[in-house]
Every structure is written in structure tokens, then in C-alpha cells.
């Protein structure tokens, strides 16, 4: 047991999938993870396509994407779990792991976003998620590496180079 305030790995956390199943982040040890808060009615919603392309390209190279639907910004994810799953599948062919709808801020913040957004918990940086499709990068050891806001495209050089292990400027 680590003392209070000592940064921890994401591998200590659990969540629920969109289907309501338990999901243990410890199962992702040894994989790079991109976590993204998603919404079905957002100007950035077409990023689902690039996220799926990124996932398909690198899923066999110890890389996963975890999507967390979120209704925090402009009420842009009003759907139920069934509606979200159908939307993602039908419109974007999403095959990466989608989780239950969560809150990314405020009093109702989910444990995963509490960890992602708090330097005290993640040991790296404080983040205030400002909109849908913010992207967190987690390394193979379960440590937060970086955060990119909505405007950074999933296939951006910064994200692709990180997945491929290339040095960036």
C-alpha cells in the first residue's frame, strides 16, 4: 500500500465497459494506452474514424485505445450505453474498447479521470479536460506520459511517433 499522495500506476484502477463488464487496467500491463473522452454529437466526433484507423494499425504492436463516452460538454453524449455502442459501430466501425459513460470533471468525476487529471495521483501533470476527444497517453508501465486536447488529431505525428517509439522534437 502506497502512502496517501504517492503517485500510482493506471494499472491499479478498474472501470466498467460499455456492456457493463468489469475492466481491470492491470490487464493492460506492457501496452501503450491512449485514453479519449468521446461524444456522439460533437464537432470532433469524426475523430472516431481516425481513432479506429490508429487502433487497427497498431493493435498488434502492444497498443490499445480506451474510449470513455462523456456528456460533460454541451450535452453532446446524451445516449444510453446501447445507443452509444450502436452509433460507434454503425457510423465508425469502432472495435477498440469503449467504456461506460463517465464524468471527466467536477464533483462527479470518475476515478479514472480523477487519476488522469491529478498530478498528485498520476505523478506527471494536472489536466483540466476542456472538451470532448482529449487524449491521454499512458506508457507500458501504466504511467501518464502526455495529454493532447481535442484539436490534436489521433493520427498526428506526436501520437504516432510516441506509439512507434520515435523521439519527437
Image (cartoon, rainbow, N blue to C red):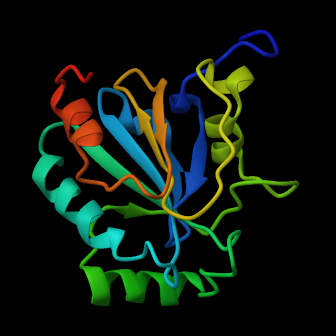
The quadrant in which residue 46 appears is bottom left
Q: Compared to 167, does 62 lie above or below?
A: below
Q: Compared to 16, does 5 lie above or below?
A: above
Q: How many marks?
A: 0
Instruction: Give percent across and percent down for residue 44.
Output: 44, 72
Q: Compared to 67, does 40 lie above or below?
A: below
Instruction: Give percent across and percent down for residue 21.
Output: 52, 63
Instruction: Give percent across and percent down for residue 141.
Output: 40, 20
Q: Residue at x 30, y 54 (%)?
A: 154
Q: Residue at x 41, y 37 (%)?
A: 137
Q: The N terminus is located in which quarter?
A: top right
Q: Is residue 147 left or right of residue 127?
A: left
The quadrant in which residue 158 appears is top left
The quadrant in which residue 97 appears is bottom left
Instruction: Give percent across and percent down for residue 72.
Output: 71, 69
- Seen from the viewer's position, the closer of residues 19 and 63 is 63
Q: Residue at x 20, y 55 (%)?
A: 54
Q: Is residue 64 left or right of residue 56?
A: right
The residue lying furthest to the front in this view is: 169
Q: Residue at x 72, y 12 (%)?
A: 6
Q: Compared to 157, does 66 lie above or below?
A: below
Q: The C terminus is located in which quarter?
A: top left
The residue lying furthest to the top in this view is: 3
The residue lying furthest to the right in this view is: 107
Amino acid at each position: 500500500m502506497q502512502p496517501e499522495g504517492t503517485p500510482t500506476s493506471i494499472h491499479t484502477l478498474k472501470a466498467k465497459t460499455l456492456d457493463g463488464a468489469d475492466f481491470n487496467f492491470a490487464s493492460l500491463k506492457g501496452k501503450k494506452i491512449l485514453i479519449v473522452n468521446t461524444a456522439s454529437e460533437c464537432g470532433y466526433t469524426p475523430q472516431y474514424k481516425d481513432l479506429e484507423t490508429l487502433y487497427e494499425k497498431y493493435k498488434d504492436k502492444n497498443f490499445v485505445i480506451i474510449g470513455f463516452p462523456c456528456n460533460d460538454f454541451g450535452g453532446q453524449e446524451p445516449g444510453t450505453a446501447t445507443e452509444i455502442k450502436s452509433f460507434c459501430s454503425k457510423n465508425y466501425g469502432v472495435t477498440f474498447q469503449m467504456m461506460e459513460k463517465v464524468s471527466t470533471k467536477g464533483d462527479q468525476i470518475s476515478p479514472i479521470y480523477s487519476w488522469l487529471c491529478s498530478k498528485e495521483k498520476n505523478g506527471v501533470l494536472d489536466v483540466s479536460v476542456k472538451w470532448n476527444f482529449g487524449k491521454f497517453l499512458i506508457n507500458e508501465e501504466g504511467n501518464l506520459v502526455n495529454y493532447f486536447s481535442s484539436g490534436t488529431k489521433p493520427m498526428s505525428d506526436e501520437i504516432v511517433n510516441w506509439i512507434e517509439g520515435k523521439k519527437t522534437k
